[in-house]
Amino acid sequence: MKSILKDCLTLKNGNGTIIALSVLFLLLTVFFRESLYGVFGEQNYLTIHLIMEFFIITIAFSIAIQSWMVFPHILSSYRLWIGALFFAVGLLEVAHAITFKGMPFFLSESSAYKATWFFMVSRLTEVVGLLFIVTSKDRLVSSSKRFVAYTIALVYAVFWLIALYYPTSLFPDLVKEGVGTTTLKNNLQYAGMAVELIIIYVVAVRFRSKEVFNSMLVMASVYLMTADYFFTTYKSVYDVNNFIGHWFQLAGFYFLQRAVYQSSVEEPFLKQKETENLLIQNERFLQTITSNMGEGLIVMNGNGELTYMNHEAERLLGWSEEELLRKNVHDYIHRHKDGGYIPREKCYGLRAGKLGKVYRINEDYFIRKDGVIFPVSYAASPFQEEGQETGSILVFRDITKMKKDQELIQYMAFYDELTKLPNIRYLKERWDETVKSLPTNKAAILILDINRFKNINEALGHSFGDLILQAAANRLHENISKEMQLCRLTGDEFVLVLPTGDEQEVITIYNRIHQSFKEPIQAQHLLLNVTMRCGVALYPEDGANLDILLQHANSALVEAQNKNKSVQFYELSMDGKALDHLVFENDLYHALSKNELHVVYQPQVDIFKGQVIGLEALLRWQHPVHGWISPLKFISIAEETGLIIPIGQWILRTACLQVKEWQDRGIPPLRVSVNLSIRQFYQQNLVDSIKDILEETGLPAEYLELEITESMMMNIEHTKKTLDDLKELGIRIAVDDFGTGYSSLSYLKHLPVDRLKIDKSFVQDIVNKDSDLTIISTIISMAHFLNLEVIAEGVETIFQKEMLQSRHCTQVQGYLISKPLPPDKLYDEFNAIGQKAKEVVEAYVEKGME
């Protein structure tokens, strides 16, 4: 209701003026009715009435004409019956005007009888008709109904003309001269007012809308209801209440005309303007979308001729819209991959429009204006107008980059990025095909592993290790034939598939590969001697499934590592060893906390002086089930799992505490040698942790010797800095297993090393191999030249000791003097060990005197 009042009270379109005049007339009537009786002069009331009726009739017919004209465009039943209703009302109002008292003769003399009945019929027709309209449902009706509705209105008006012009009065009088309106007229007026109230209620409650039509309809009803009231109170036609009634009737008709005009003319016009603006906005939006959609858009008519092309399509094809307009697009842009022409009947873009189907093509080829053919994906859809296929729409994109990305993804999925070799996924995907292509239906699966590769990675870094892997992959690839398949498995392991199941042939091929690695690999400024081990599984003897074959080949590789063999074929007995390895690894995690690890000490002797000069701390593991386990079996596991770091820290602390305890118990000061693993050596806090251990145990730094291997010396910068920092603490440095590693001997002169340890592998074969004796002599000579001490480990016989002594090796370690002993036993036998050392020296002296 608030919206209705707001719409009606506004001064827009003269509504406020009419309302203001109406209020003024009401006030004048209330306070000055008697004095205003006949105020306009009785002779002028006829003219005034005629003028008012003229406006009322004009408005009634304008409503009828407006509704007649706009109905074919909106086909609204509301508008149709409102027009027909006011067509009948207009005719009745004409009859009322020409029969008003004082009007000239027309068909019959004018009379109050005819005039009041025509007015009353018009009034009741109007309110009852409006009530019927507002309580019915607005719906779309056929345009032909317009003639039916207006014909009914005409027949209805003619009926009342005949009835009221009938020579004999058919109805009672409604007004008595000098008395006023009769009870019947007043009741009819009240009935009209009641209907108006119902109309107001229905419009206000049922149609809770802000539409101006409903607002004006309510306002008209209020005015017409007020007019009815005044028409029940006048005493004669000259009464001012009659004039006021006609004024409110005129104002009511005005608001009705405003309602129809608003809904039939102004509202459609505004909606049309709104639709036009929306259409313009949509066209601009569509242009923006099609221009920036990132895909080419082509619209064709039923003949395949271009009607529209967006900017992206122009960019992708090199053609402008003007160049292809009204030309068959297929002939200009559609081609086979090789540039061949595609018949029109096979073009999905044309078929979409003709068959009314949607086609989605993942890969096809278009040709640019410059002749370049490029891959595309597109969707072709039929284009419809009024339910009929009139063409097709083609939305496409250049998939050149996508295809390259797919090829890259395919490559990355099946090839190793570092070595450029196929990966294990590639081998698995092609395994069935590989098996079918085997000439003898037999094959050998070789897993090749680079020895001590982890040491290279930890010493020189992963980038350096990557260079080794690339060089190894290239060397492997150079030594295989095209019938063989080489793949990278993982880390430093490669898989080689040989199309043969003959063991001797497999060994021959492997030996050729092994021989190729005799030549050092160049990696930046270093020449490294790289060797490989191999585990072999045979198809189909050792398995038909590739995963099983790889598992068996890996078991053979582990066996080769354990036995220090170059190549090993799979055997059934190896199946349980992988599980044993896993069990040992798990047990090793708890060995330290369960006090299963022990440190034993092997004396080191000066064979010229005959005295014990030091000890080497060695690790032993007493397994609760398997007893004493060789370090060769579990040290590699500790290094793989990283357990070597906490174990190494424990050995270092234990050895320092033990030597300090011996010193306190009276044993002459001795150096203790402790091995550092490569993982320990490359710890960032190595120097600080060793310093803390020395301070914690109270052992002077000069009694601690740390043994490093040649493999740790590959990263010369890190090695030199670390060793310099350790030397500043006063710690001695020894190189263990000298002569077996990667590094150049020239590095020694740049590093703060105190002692070299000749590996026991050279000492053990000193009797049988002249080459080993030559290596030992070279190492000793070089050490003396560099002012370094030399100690040989693994000395077990007098002959070995004498050969070393004759080459001026001053220090030895081995079972000839003593096996590694637990701390208590070493303490108890220390004097005996010293005595044995003197006896060994004296035996050499006596032999020399002889």
Image (spheres, helix red, strand yellow):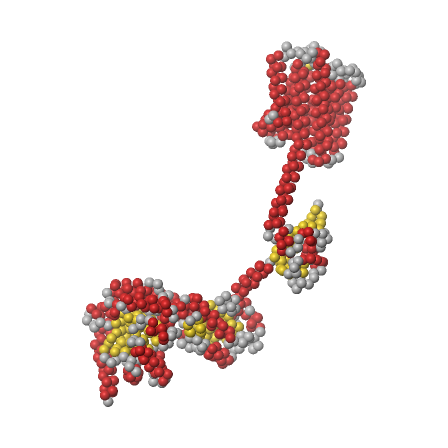
> Is residue 794 in view from this perspective?
no
Q: Nearer the viewer, residue 723 or 812?
A: 723
The image quadrant of residue 669 is: bottom left
Q: Is residue 231 left or right of residue 775?
A: right
What is the number of callouts on the image? 0
Q: Nearer the viewer, residue 386 or 730?
A: 730
Vertical position of residue 201 compared to residue 572: above or below: above
**Which residue is painted at 54% across and 67% down in the image?**
429
x then y, percent, for residue 379? 64, 54
Q: Which quarter of the figure is the C terminus placed in?
A: bottom left
Q: Is residue 753 left or right of residue 434?
A: left
Q: Is residue 541 left or right of residue 186?
A: left
- Of all residues shown, which one is farthest toward the left? 666
Vertical position of residue 490 compared to residue 608: above or below: above
x then y, percent, for residue 34? 64, 10
x then y, percent, for residue 806? 29, 84
Q: Nearer the viewer, residue 523 or 376?
A: 523
**Which residue is painted at 44% across and 74% down in the image?**
521
